[in-house]
Amino acid sequence: MPVHFGDFTLDESRRQLLRGAEPIHLSPKAFQLLSILVQESPRAVSKSDLQERLWPDTFVTEGNLSSAVAELRSALGDDRREPRFIRTLYGFGYSFAAATHQEQVPAKLRRRSTIAALAALTVVVTLALVLIVPSALRSHAAPTVQIRSLAVLPFDTTGSDVACQHLGLGLPDLLITRLGNVRQLVVRPTSAIRDYAAGTVDWRDAGRKLKVDAVLEGNVRTTSDRVRVTVRLLHVRDQKTIWADAFDAKRNDIFSIEDTIAARVAEALTMRLTPSEKLLLSKRYTADPQAYDLYIQGRYEFERARDGQPANRQKSIEMYQRALEKDPSYALAWAGLAQANASLGARHEAPPQVVFPVADAAATKALHLDQDLSEAHCAAGAVKMYWHLDFDGAEREFLQALQLNPRNTIALDYYGFLLQCMQRSEESIALRQRLLEVDPLSVASNWSLANAYLTAGQDSRGIQQTLQVLSMNPNYPYAYDALTRFYAMHGQHEKAIVYARRNVHLNPGPRSLAFLGYALGRAGQRAEAKAILQRLSADEGNLPFYEALVYLGLGDREAVFPLLEKGLVDRTYVLRLKSEPMFEPLHSDPRFQSLLRRAGLGS
């Protein structure tokens, strides 16, 4: 029997897809894919299962399946970022997201039933207009609007106590986390709205730049004992207010304001929430207002630290610790403590042997208190990946984190990096593309995709994406590193050295210096490369990877291996051993293969 969904009809007996009465052309494989997904709906189907059913007894790459999905989405007018029909389960497969129904009534009877139903509907509508509409108008209910994406802008704290300035970013950050649990709503992450905390924001301009349907803006005013938050939910395209309200509470009951705003936003957007979404939207993790306020401050400092200031990450750790002193059972604060310490270790901003055990213990505690914290699973995955070199365990944690919150940008980034280091290139690129969909204006997200392309050997796309990063931030150090590496490896030494010198000028430090030394060594300018080596070796805080990089440029393998051995012990850049293109000349050396095996990266 024909199956209907949206404006479409799938008629397998005639092997036709119709939009209304108009046939839609599909290739045989795309039609078969649609049939499988509709038959299995709402169950998700793995990529391996789909490949076996579409191409039995034939070896094909994952790209064949991706092409069929792309053709199907194009025919249905579906958006992979905000799908109505074909939903991607990253790292697993696909599912059919739309409701379907089949024809089960003979045509004549159906026509009679339709006429009777229309007559009955006319009566019902007439009664509704007479009885219901005036009441609805009196209640000032929010208008029905089709909103699929939202940005919560930093709140204005002008006139508030200095001690409450953190609420300007901290409160929106918590609302973003809560509203992110609504699967049908794409909420821009805090990293996307941080820059708007610096001054006056034009919500129309912000909404257009952030590519969202609606924005939530607000202001916070405080006195010695009270907090007042005024918010407006605004439609970007129509430039109209969807809903507005003001909330007053005692200073020690601010989390009741957060509860109410999150619920009212979902209500104003006429979202049909699942029971689990309703539970997460209203869930509180502490009853202690002081612990809650300290947690908000910790989130505020952590977001500031993501701009590259490790001192703010340390401040966030202090705030989380103070929150836990107030409430030792505060699972979210344990998760924040784990996340901040894991970030310090992953970025080599603190000794890994010090911070990763702290992150490990904090994540374990958070998960003991609440198994459903995406942030805790993400931090646990980072510890397993960077410190324990337990890549299977890390993947399980990242998948669980994304199952709980598919838009957890840190989990998307970490998991994409893990897949990249394991040389699962297509999966890594897909995750990085997903990260960019969630956070399109993030320089770091754009760089992650560029790095995935370059590591996968997709040079033209990698260079194009790297230049896109530099157009967004002309000082971004990792983009210069990538261009230096690429041109040095391809024998374009002058270009490589120009990019490397510019990076040293813009971002002075051992990393940029090491890449310059690598480029100089590859170009045969050995004296200057060796001078850089002396500077690096004199720096006690220097990582062994940086010196190894210069020796690699100089072609001195005997000096490279002891440094890589030290890096394996210190867990510095060991994950990049297998995937880093600069190490390709070492792949045939038995010592390198031994390193890979001990790092858990051997084939």
Image (spheres, grey):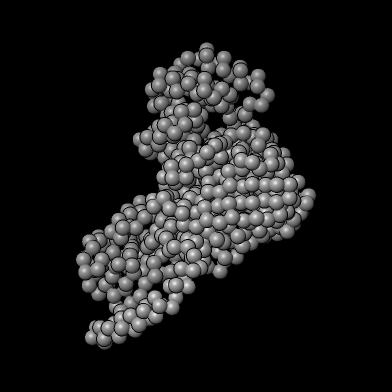
Q: Which residue is drawn at 57% across and 61% down?
A: 263
Closer to the camera in the image, 5 or 241 = 241
- Viewer can see residue 444: yes
Residue 52, placed above or below residue 164: below
Closer to the camera in the image, 456 or 247 = 247
Which residue sits furthest left?
22
Res 20 quadrant in image: bottom left
Can you give x and y, in whole percent of width and height, for residue 443 in the image? 48, 37
Res 461 quadrant in image: top left
Q: Residue at x 39, y 52 (%)?
A: 238
Can you give x and y, in whole percent of width and height, for residue 247 in the image? 62, 56
Which residue sits furthest top?
527
Residue 562, placed above or below residue 38: above
Residue 117, placed above or below residue 302: below
Q: Residue at x 35, y 75 (%)?
A: 101
Q: Which residue is drawn at 60% across and 60% down?
A: 260
Can you give x and y, in whole percent of width and height, for residue 559 in the image? 58, 24
